[in-house]
Amino acid sequence: MTCKGVIREISNYIDGDLDPVVKQELERHLEHCEDCTMIVDQTRKSIKVLCDSRPVSLSQICYYSATYSVAPTCLRHLSSK
Ligand SMILES: [Zn+2]
């Protein structure tokens, strides 16, 4: 898997929605790619902060959406509360 692939699947990965095969590939990539490990880490933290904070402003969601494409993930978290 490439770095781009990791970014594309990142919200599914964090949500645990990833196909086991894809997940394995992604984790294998993370083992040797510091950049992606950092991005996954940051994204996870961002989601936590974003989802724990109320109210979530639209600009925040847009920011994270543009940066990490995590908005769908976060919105799912929010709506499941
Ligand atoms: Zn990478």
Image (cartoon, grey):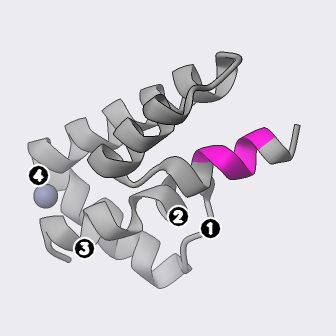
- The image quadrant of residue 19 is bottom right
Residue 11 locus on image (x, y percent): 48, 57
Instruction: Name the residue at the right extreme.
Output: 81
Count of marks overlaid on the render: 4
Residue 79 locus on image (x, y percent): 82, 46
The residues bearing labels 1 and 3 have C-alpha atoms spaced at a distance of 15 Å
Decide which of tag 2 and tag 1 comes sooner along the chain. 2
- Prevalent SS, magenta region: helix
Identify residue type, mark 3: Gly
Q: Are marks 1 and 3 in contact (CB under 8 Å)?
A: no
The residue indicated by pointer 2 is 12
The residue indicated by pointer 1 is 17
Q: Which residue appears at 59% of the width and 52% of the height?
A: 73
The residue indicated by pointer 4 is 33
Label 1 Cα neighbours within 10 Å, binned few <14 / some 14-19 / many ≥20:
few
Q: Are marks 2 and 1 in contact (CB under 8 Å)?
A: yes
Instruction: Name the residue at the front extreme.
Output: 58
Of helix, strand and loop, which one carries label 3?
Answer: helix
Identify residue type, mark 2: Asn
Q: Is mark 4 within 8 Å of ligand 1?
A: yes
Residue 38 locus on image (x, y percent): 22, 36
Determine the quadrant in which ligand 1 lies.
bottom left
Q: Which residue appears at 40% of the width and 58% of the height?
A: 10
The residue indicated by pointer 3 is 5
Identify residue type, mark 1: Asp
| In this view, the mark in front (3 or 4) | 3
- The region drawn magenta spans 74-78
Identify residue type, mark 4: Cys
Decide which of tag 4 and tag 1 comes sooner along the chain. 1
Decide which of tag 4 and tag 2 comes sooner along the chain. 2
| In this view, the mark in front (4 or 2) | 2
Q: Nearer the viewer, residue 12 or 29?
A: 12
